[in-house]
């Protein structure tokens, strides 16, 4: 059986029921009910994958389409998506991601009549994107927004690129679409230079390995359909699109695909939308997508991403951690671990632990990390005994080992992606213990005593409630 | 940081912000609260402090 979203949900239900929460009460996504439930769960420090069985569409009717969201909120669930042990969801998972990123698997083509995503097909005036249960996420959002994956194809070299992109409902056959990732921008610029409408598809659900694979940091010329196959660990099945046939192939096992074109030079109002950084993207002018077809499985499940929360943070961190680690190992050889914490929305901050052998190595690590991750604003380098996945430990290192006159470097006028109050500046903080001065030791209970005491022989841990 | 300016919808008085690129364009903004469309100059409140 080819991998798909329903199969993954079934796998969770059967083998990891604690990861899945199913809600069968009728929900109205355009009235913020989906995100209100997710936010309540977040406030309780709970991050299950949530399946809403009965959802209202934009037309005020029962859509007949469930919504699944929050799949990526836990690294353990991301590990399950990649068939990796969930108890190794920290650095080992990041290294596994970077390993998959270097692989590729050629896709296979199946005929349209065998493609699940073509079980139901709407074209022309039959298309109404409003039949979908599109989520309205945050108070200042312009309206309901689709938050999944857009895919375009370079007109010259033919490579496909898939990226997470938001799309605003603007009418039955129109979406406001914000093309802002480097590869998709490049493809769009090419079509605009040619004066031609740019074909684009929007993929509203697939096996989560598909989504994780779409985030792989690969060269522009690499076909994302091949990269995604590596993450699925099987060839991605493709089928001809309804609008363009074999000139544009779509994932055959997707849940829902919207096909359309971006007319050159047309811009309309989109945003605000609650973004990755937990601020709203300001209202602005962006492209529009004229929808030409909507195809779906008969029993489709629509996926949504809970932006500005744990799910989107992990989608930022996982693709970068392994890559930064590999770069550090290649250039320095003393990296221990890399983590992009949720406090930095999985992008803005990078914590690195190294086995330092001489002064200056920490700053080199910081510069290499900034070069590798354009979105990162602050890099903190700590010693090998600091767990970069334990943020209080990292902050302790900053507060006790940093000499601001020597260990903090502000770099001006450097390219970045998210413009927060940091602007176009970056910061490297060397929080490693200095080797060239007499320095105090960290307190420690002797290993002998720690090994001798087995807690189970002294107390009943079940009775320890705080 | 990208420059923004805050406006208020002349109909519902709901406040939201826009990319500064829109500040002097003849483009109708869309209120996210009531969907009213209006020009920047119609906003009873503009905060463009920089």
Image (cartoon, coloured by chain):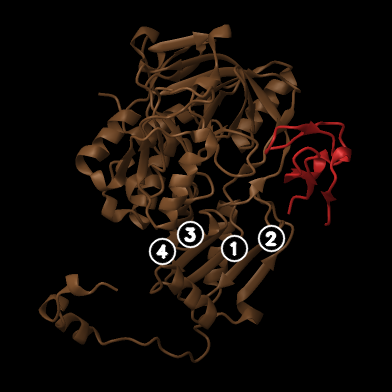
Q: Nearer the viewer, mark 2 or mark 1?
A: 2
Judge whether B26 appears above or below A62 on screen: below
Same chain for mark 3 and mark 4? The answer is yes
Q: Are marks 4 and 1 on the same chain?
A: yes
In this rendered view, identify the residue nearer to me: A368 or A281: A281
Q: Alpha-carbon distance for marks 1 and 3?
A: 11 Å
- Judged from the image, the secondary structure of the residue bearing numbered disc 1 is strand
- Chain under label 3? A
**Residue named by callout 2:** A422
Q: Is residue A459 above or below residue A193?
A: below
**Measured Cα–Cα span from mark 2 to mark 3:** 17 Å
Image spot of residue A118 (x, y percent): 41, 13
State which quadrant residue B16 falls in: top right
Q: Which residue is mark 1?
A: A378
Q: Quick one: label 2 or label 4, which is nearer the N terminus?
A: 4
Q: Residue at x 38, y 12 (%)?
A: A119
The image quadrant that residue A421 belongs to is bottom right
Numbered circle sitting on residue A389: 4
**Cβ–Cβ under 8 Å for marks 2 and 4:** no
Q: Nearer the viewer, residue A339 or B46?
A: B46
Q: Chain of mark 1?
A: A
| C-alpha separation, residue under disc 3 versus residue under disc 4 | 7 Å
> Dot 1, crowdedness within 10 Å: few (<14), some or many (≥20)?
many
Q: Which colour denotes chain B?
A: red
In this view, the residue farthest toward the front is: B12
Q: Which mark is residue B15?
A: none
Establish if A129 lies above or below B1: above
Front tag of 1 and 3: 3
Circle 4 packing at 10 Å, graded few (<14), some (14-19), many (20+), is some
Q: Disc number at residue A341?
A: 3
- Disc 1 and disc 3 in contact, CB within 8 angstroms: no
């Amino acid at each position: 059986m080819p991998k798909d979203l329903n199969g993954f949900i079934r796998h969770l239900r059967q083998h990891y029921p604690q990861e899945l929460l199913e809600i069968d009460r009728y929900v109205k996504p355009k009235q913020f009910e989906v995100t209100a439930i997710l936010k309540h769960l977040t406030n309780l420090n709970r991050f299950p994958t949530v399946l809403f069985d009965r959802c209202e569409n934009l037309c005020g009717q029962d859509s007949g389409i469930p919504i699944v969201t929050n799949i990526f909120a836990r690294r353990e669930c991301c590990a399950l998506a990649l068939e990796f042990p969930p108890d190794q969801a920290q650095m080992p998972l990041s290294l596994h991601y970077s390993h998959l990123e270097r692989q590729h698997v050629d896709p296979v083509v199946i005929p349209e009549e065998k493609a699940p995503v073509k079980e139901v097909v709407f074209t022309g005036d039959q298309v109404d994107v409003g039949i979908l249960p599109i989520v309205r996420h945050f108070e200042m959002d312009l309206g309901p927004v689709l938050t999944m994956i857009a895919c375009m194809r370079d007109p010259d070299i033919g490579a496909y690129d898939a990226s997470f992109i938001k799309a605003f409902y603007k009418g039955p056959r129109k979406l406001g679409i914000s093309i802002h990732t480097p590869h998709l921008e490049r493809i769009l610029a090419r079509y605009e230079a040619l004066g031609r409408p740019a074909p684009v598809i929007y993929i509203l659900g697939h096996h989560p390995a598909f989504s994780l694979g779409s985030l792989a940091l690969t060269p522009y010329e690499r076909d994302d359909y091949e990269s995604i196959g590596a993450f699925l660990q099987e060839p991605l099945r493709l089928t001809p699109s309804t609008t363009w046939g074999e000139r544009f192939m779509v994932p055959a096992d997707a849940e829902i695909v919207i096909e359309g074109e971006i007319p050159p030079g047309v811009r309309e109002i989109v945003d605000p939308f609650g973004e990755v950084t937990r601020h709203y993207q300001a209202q602005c002018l962006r492209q529009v997508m004229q929808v030409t077809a909507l195809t779906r499985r008969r029993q489709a499940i629509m996926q949504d991403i809970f932006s500005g929360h744990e799910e989107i943070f992990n989608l930022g961190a996982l693709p970068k951690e392994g890559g930064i680690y590999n770069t550090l190992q290649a250039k320095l050889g003393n990296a221990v671990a890399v983590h992009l914490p949720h406090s930095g929305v999985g992008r803005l901050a990078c914590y690195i632990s190294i086995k330092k052998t001489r002064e200056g190595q920490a700053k080199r690590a910081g510069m290499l990390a900034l070069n590798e991750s354009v979105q990162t604003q602050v890099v903190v380098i700590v010693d090998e005994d600091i767990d970069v996945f334990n943020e209080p430990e990292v902050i302790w290192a900053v507060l006790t080992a940093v000499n601001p006159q020597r260990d903090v470097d502000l770099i001006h006028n450097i390219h970045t992606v998210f413009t927060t109050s940091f602007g176009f500046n970056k910061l490297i903080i060397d929080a490693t213990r200095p080797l060239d001065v007499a320095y105090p030791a960290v307190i420690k209970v002797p290993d002998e005593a720690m090994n001798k005491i087995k807690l189970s022989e002294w107390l009943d841990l079940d009775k320890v409630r705080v | 940081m990208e420059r923004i300016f805050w406006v208020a919808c002349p109909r519902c008085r709901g406040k939201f912000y826009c990319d500064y690129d829109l500040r002097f364009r003849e483009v109708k903004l869309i209120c996210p609260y009531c969907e009213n469309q209006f020009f920047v100059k119609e906003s009873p409140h503009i905060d463009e402090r920089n």
